[in-house]
Amino acid sequence: MIIDSNRSWQMSGFGLSKLTLATTEIPKPGPHELLVRTRAVSLNYKDKMIVDGALIPDLSFPFVPTSDAVGEIVAVGSAATRFKVGQRVLGQVIADWPDGDAPAVLHRHTLGSSLSGMLSQHVVFGEDAAVPAPASLSDIEAATLPIAALTAWFAMAEATKPVPGQTILIQGTGGVSLFALQFATAFGLRAIVTSSSDEKLRRVKDLGAWQTINYRTQPAWDEAARALTDGLGVNHVLEMVGGDNARRSLNALAADGRLSIIGLLGAMEISFPIIPFMRNRIVVQGISVGHRRAFERMNQAIEALGIKPVIDKVHGFDDVPQALRRLEEGPFGKIVITMA
């Protein structure tokens, strides 16, 4: 079937009511770019924050949101050499971070925020900002990797090195959290997962969680985590909430522990008492996805370990508003949109 136009979801302003379908011309790749026919897109909570106007208040319109997609290359630029037509690829979200140290100004070239996003039948990737999709994953599964999986991987396997037998506390059951749990299991870590849902906690046990804590019935979940570790505390906390929640994360940590700041579901600011940091030699790291080389290493590990992403729900391309609403409901795993 020959497609001579391009359907995209475009924002004309903030709010779901300003997100509508538009028909435009198919973009043309520049000399070092790839034209990709999108097969599936996955959502992250930041996408809803962008649509709502909470994350980038000075966004220019019209704008195509979302950052995670898998697709097939249908054309390559005249000077592109890394890929060929027909290959299945994923976009590197921070497009100017191939390896090593991050760019001096992070997020200047980021899919779905400073660069146009993925809710489009055709998208353009820079050839240096694309990676092969794992052959072991379907389109729906592969689309979930660029932010959720790479964020968890970078926090656990790049910014530090996993030590089998150590304890990691993972907050919630969203996309990053469930990838973190699967990586923890593969690395031989003891994973403690927190949630307000007993049903979700039962499901994470099936995915390999060592212990679980319901923070609704145990509000002092930091003390519960310390109790599970014989009072020593956990070695690593993945902080998904921010705000006052981070104080409990700090209290849950063992001496020489690590706090990875990943999410901001609760608040945009964090404050801590200083003495516990100094006394316990706590390392705090902000995680902002990761570089392309880490993405490639992670994909190799996913294939070798047989990891399969956890999918909450799949929506068709015409159902994007419903998919974004689902993010508010606390999905178990990833929400994916197919082009069908």
Image (spheres, grey):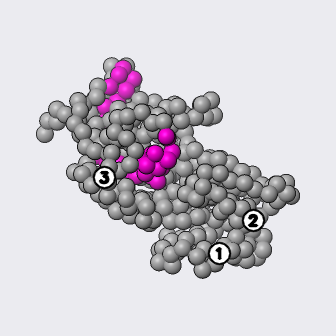
Mark before the other along the chain sequence, 2 or 3: 2
Q: Residues within 10 Å of mark 2 (few under 14, many from 20)?
A: some
Q: Amino acid at mark 1?
A: Pro
Asked if residue 138 can be seen in this view, the reply is no
Which comes sooner in the sequence, label 1 or label 3? 1
| Residue at the (19%, 34%) spot, across then down | 5
Of residue 296 and residue 145, the one placed in the foreground of this image is 145
Say whether residue 77 is visible: yes
Q: Secondary structure at mark 3?
A: helix
Relative to 211, is 108 on the left or the right? Answer: left
Residue bearing the label numbered 3: 320
Q: CA distance from mark 1 to mark 2?
A: 13 Å
**Magenta residues, start to end:** 29-57
Q: Give, as a three-letter code, the residue at label 3.
A: Val
Q: CA distance from mark 2 to mark 3?
A: 40 Å
- 165 lies above or below 305: below
Between marks 1 and 2 in the image, the one whose residue lies nearer the viewer: 1
Q: Quadrant of residue 266?
A: bottom right
Determine whether label 2 and label 3 are within 8 Å by CB.
Answer: no
Residue 152 in picture, x, y percent from top left: 55, 53
Residue named by callout 1: 219
Residue at 31% x, 52% y: name it: 320
Disc 2 versus disc 3: nearer the observer: 3
Question: Where residue 312 appears, x then y in whole percent?
Answer: 38, 64
Residue sitting at 28 percent across and 37 percent down?
A: 122
Q: Amino acid at mark 2?
A: Asn
Q: Residue at x 53, y 61 (%)?
A: 177
Residue 209 x, y percent position in the rendering: 56, 71
Q: Where does label 2 land, which residue?
A: 251
Quarter of the rendering containing residue 89: top left
